[in-house]
Image (cartoon, rainbow, N blue to C red):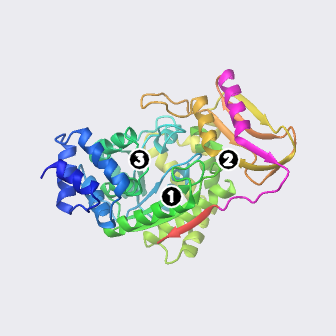
Amino acid sequence: MRMYDLIMKKRNGKPLEKEEIDWMISEYTAGRIPDYQMSAFLMAVYFQGMSEEETLNLTMAMAHSGEMLDLSGIRGIKVDKHSTGGVGDKTSLALTPMVAACGIRVAKMSGRGLGHTGGTIDKLESFSGFSTEISAEQFEEQVNRIGISIMGQTADLAPADKKLYALRDVTATVDQMSLIASSIMSKKLAAGADAIVLDVKTGSGAFMKTREDALALAEEMVRIGNGAGKHTIAVVSDMNQPLGNAVGNALEVQEAIATLRGEGPEDFTELCLTIGSYMLVAGKKADTPEEARAMLRRVIADGSALKKLEQFVEAQGGDPGQVRHPELLPAAAIREPVLAPMDGYLQSIQCEEVGNCSMILGGGRETKESELDLSVGLILHKKTGDFVKKGEPLATIHANDREKAAQASKRYLAACRIGEEPVQRPELIHAVIR
Ligand code: URA
């Protein structure tokens, strides 16, 4: 086979055969196809698209380009969860102990964040001593013993995607539906779970800005998951404003703990209950989402979800005392309120800008090597649709540097639009694709 012929075939709008995709991905992973040829191919896909069959074949080829995690040593149905990412998205922190307390086996691989805010692993490292660099043996033993473990993504998980994603990033070929869907799903399939629940975000703080695009991506990923023999469900949820009130690593951990105590913000709690209920259905712990929701509410009310987080933190070397006493988590020295300049309704919050504010404060990464300040971030006091009086705080900035605090405060204020007209709160759950 020659890469030249495959580029021309795709350029002319013809579908590639499975054998051709398998060959191309294995040769590219091995370094035998140069980046310039793969770039041309990606651009051809950008304009010509891929059929459902091609997208599934590409996903499977990328999933098999490295290690396929074998979770067969873990008893029961393993259910994974994935979010396409957004500002204040700490869902995994609260959700995984909740579903584990209901008997679901959570064997999850997570990543660090780049840009905006930290990823799940960065947030978990707010607990002193917590580590996700654990062996496969400890991972398996821990899931069998306490029902939950989260480990860092290994370098050998879908290496073809790693190379391709880096190339797409510099060739203007990231935002193509089949390429995004196959990239995300290849990593999920390689991570070995039996069932997958996806949280596809839409809105100003999400990758998919429009509801239509988010729905199309969700449908594509569900098709791939089911095509690969994994029970896959997608929830399309809103990201036109930050999720919950906390943005920033340790602040988000505190909010997740409050949610496990039953004292979390309404939108964040609702999202955890929605995604959690589909995880329980996919894991066959409940027959209907309604029954599952009642189970999740029970483990919050009786304290077993919070206890599960404590066990999980302790098992991975963290300090469980910080779950009982979240005030012991890293805290910033400076608290600066952002005051409303006028009376009115908060009409919108430019979500991506809130992520940028956290980044300015040191809560996100500019490069892979950046050190995070886990203590900084923002607490929102008003969300879209709320009425605010002049001089009332819209948010509080948590910072360790006065100049950065002033910069973030200015940008946060500019990101908020206040007007006289009342506006509706954005709908949180846009769709569920089963
Ligand atoms: N996240 C991924 O992992 N891949 C994409 O292509 C886009 C978002």
Picture coordinates of residue 294 (x, y %)? 60, 71
Mark 2 / mark 1, whichever is N-terminal: 1
Q: For this rendering, which residue is in front, 264 or 246?
A: 246
**Which marked residue is nearer to the observer: mark 3 or mark 1?**
3
- Which numbered tag is attached to residue 174? 3
Q: For this rendering, which residue is in front, 81 or 344?
A: 344
Q: Quadrant of residue 9?
A: bottom left
Q: Is mark 2 within 8 Å of ligand 1?
A: no
CA separation in Å, label 3 and label 2: 30 Å
> Residue tagged by mark 1?
200
> Residue tagged by mark 2?
245
Q: Residues within 10 Å of mark 2 (few under 14, many from 20)?
A: many
Q: Which region of the structure is painted magenta?
A: 402-427
Mark 3 / mark 1, whichever is N-terminal: 3
Mark 3 / mark 2, whichever is N-terminal: 3
Q: Disc 2 on helix, strand or loop? A: loop
Q: Is mark 3 within 8 Å of ligand 1?
A: yes
